[in-house]
Image (cartoon, rainbow, N blue to C red):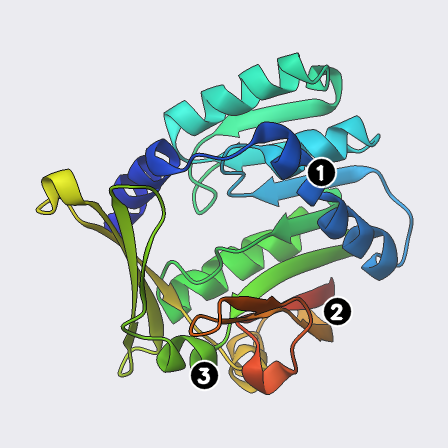
Amino acid sequence: MEWVEKFYNQQYKWMNLNVEEMLNAQQGLLQKIECLVDQPGKKILELGGGKGYFAVAAAKQGYNVTVIELIDEAAQYIRQLAEEQRASERLTILNGDFYTADIPDVFDVVCYWDGFGIGSDTEQQKLLNRIRNWLKPDGTALIDVYTPWFWAKVAGQEMYLTENVVRKYGFDAMGCRMLDTWWNEEDAAEKVTQSLRCYSPADFSLLIQNLDLSLIYCEPGGAMDYEKGVYTEKAPLHEAMSYLLKLKRN
C-alpha cells in the first residue's frame, strides 16, 4: 500500500470542488444510513474521510461523527470546514491510518465510502475485523465495493479533470484491481496511481466467511457511459461501477 499517501495527497490538491454542492450531495448517503440502519443511533465512524464533506454534513444533521483521515492536510481541511459550518461540537477528527490507529470506542454505524480495496485480501480481512470490533452489538457497517466487470470494461478511458490534470483508468486483470492514474500535463513524469481491489458480491462473501460478520444486503450503485457522457444513478448490478454492502456482527 505504498502508493496510498502519495496518491491521496496529490488527489486532494488537484480536486477543485464546490463546498456547498459537495455538502448537499451527502444527503443521498445520509438517506442510505436512515434506510439501512436497523436500530436508530447517532454515533458514526467514517473511514477515510477525504476532505470531510460527509462527516461535516452528518454532524450538521445531528449525528456524532468520528472521522479518520490519513492525509495531514485533508484532516486539517476537515477541521476548518467543521468550524466554518459550525459542526465542530459533534465531530471528532483523527489524523491517522485506520489499519493501525487505536479507536477505543464503538459505534452504531461504521461507513467506508468509495475507497475499499486499497490493500491485499489479507489486509482487507484485517480491516473488516477491525470494523467488526468498532460496531456496537446491533451496529451496521456500510461499505462501497468496486465491481470488476465495470472497471475491466472502461480500462483505457482517459479524461481531463481540469485544464491540465488528466485521469486514466486501467485494470489489472490478474490481481482484479482497478487502476486510477492522475497526472498534470505540465509535469507528466509525476504520475500517481491508486489501485483498488474489486470484488463481486460472491467474492466478498468468501472474503468474510471466517470473520464474525454477515452480509445482509447489497445495493448496486450507478454506471457511467463515457462514450455518451451519461451517468445512470441506479444501474443493474452486472453494469454497476460499485455496490453498497450492509454488514452486521454475527
Which residue does the numbered mark 2 point to in the structure image? 250
Kindly report the distance in space between the C-alpha atoms of the residues bearing marks 3 and 2: 30 Å
Q: Is residue 118 visible?
A: yes
Question: Toward the viewer: 245 or 61?
Answer: 61
Marked residue nearer the N-terminal end (3 or 2)? 3
Kindly report the distance in space between the C-alpha atoms of the residues bearing marks 3 and 1: 30 Å
Residue 24 image label? 1
Which residue does the numbered mark 3 point to in the structure image? 149
Q: Is residue 169 above or below residue 17?
A: below
Q: Residues within 10 Å of mark 2 (few under 14, many from 20)?
A: few
Image coordinates for residue 110, horizontal then vertical, percent: 67, 49
Q: Is residue 122 left or right of residue 33?
A: left
- Choose mark 3 or mark 1, whichever is in front: 1
Marked residue nearer the N-terminal end (3 or 1)? 1
Residue type, label 3: Trp
Outermost residue to the left? 189
The residue under the point 70% across, 66% down is 247
Residue type, label 2: Asn
Q: Is residue 102 visible?
A: no
Task: Work out which quarter of the rendered image holds the C terminus and state it.
Answer: bottom right
- Choose mark 3 or mark 2, whichever is in front: 3
The residue under the point 69% across, 71% down is 234
Tell me whether the residue at label 3 lies in contact with that at label 1, contact meaning CB atoms closer than 8 angstroms.
no
SS under mark 3: helix
Question: Toward the viewer: 156 or 246?
Answer: 156
